[in-house]
């Protein structure tokens, strides 16, 4: 499976792409800047523009051929289309994703290697992370608020690096779920 376009171009929020296939309510394009969701993170929101109008993207489905962009209605876009990601929503998901990693690191450190068991980022700017913490003291959990807020106040730079799954699995402690 080839690497997703958004891994190499995370800041590209608008892209012209050739239509590869259509079916009622869905279009498959040659490449897409849309993140389809996963790992507790919601998919990107946005629209598909074409000569026949503008279609809000209602969902994304991946299959062996690529990423299908779903929309309401029976329109059948053809030729080239422009895919546009909603920038405020993408920024929100990025911020929540980063914050979830910070919380994960704090809990992992404070609770002797506690493992993440789930996460959910929400469109209302909230998120949830679940950990395996049998017998955890609630006061110790609440005490993580101060170091978390300190990290946020420091406004540290954030960067990302794509790492093939096999390489990432070889790094001890990188996967903590």
Image (cartoon, helix red, strand yellow):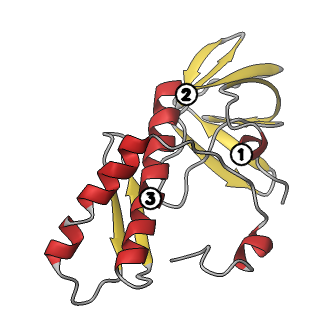
Q: Which mark is residue 46?
A: 2
| Residue underneath mark 1 | 67
Left or right: 67 in relation to 30? left
Q: Secondary structure at mark 3?
A: helix
Image quarter for residue 17? top right
Kindly indicate the quadrant of the structure image that contains residue 113: bottom left
Name the residue tied to disc 3.
102
Q: Which numbered disc flags the more N-terminal residue, 2 or 3?
A: 2
Mark 1: which secondary structure? Answer: strand
Q: Is residue 12 above or below residue 162?
A: above
For the question of whether residue 165 can be seen, the reply is yes
Mark 2–mark 1 Cα distance, whole angstroms, equals 14 Å
Which quarter of the image is occupied by the N terminus?
A: bottom right
Q: Residue at x 46, y 32 (%)?
A: 89
Q: Which residue is more in the foreground, 67 or 13?
A: 13
Q: Are there few (<14), some (14-19), or many (20+) residues within 10 Å of tag 2?
A: many
Instruction: Please state which of residues 36 and 10 is positioned toward the viewer in this rendering.
Output: 10
- Precedes in sequence: disc 2 or disc 1: 2
**Is 85 drawn above or below residue 50 in the view shown?**
below
Residue 45 is left or right of residue 123, and the answer is: right
């Amino acid at each position: 499976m080839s690497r997703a376009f958004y891994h190499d171009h995370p800041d590209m929020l608008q892209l012209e792409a050739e239509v590869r296939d259509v079916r009622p309510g869905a279009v498959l394009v040659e490449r897409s800047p849309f993140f389809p969701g996963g790992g507790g993170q919601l998919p990107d929101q946005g629209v598909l523009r074409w000569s026949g109008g503008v279609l809000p993207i209602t969902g994304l489905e991946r299959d062996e051929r690529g990423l299908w962009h779903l929309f309401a209605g029976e329109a059948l876009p053809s030729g080239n289309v422009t895919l546009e990601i909603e920038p405020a929503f993408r920024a929100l998901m990025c911020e929540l994703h980063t914050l979830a990693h910070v919380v994960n690191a704090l809990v992992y450190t404070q609770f002797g290697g506690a493992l993440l068991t789930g996460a959910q980022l929400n469109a209302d700017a909230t998120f949830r992370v679940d950990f395996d913490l049998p017998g955890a003291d609630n006061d110790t959990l609440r005490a993580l608020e101060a170091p978390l807020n300190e990290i946020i106040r420091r406004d540290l730079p954030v960067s990302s690096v794509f790492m093939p799954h096999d390489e990432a699995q070889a790094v001890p402690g990188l996967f903590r779920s």
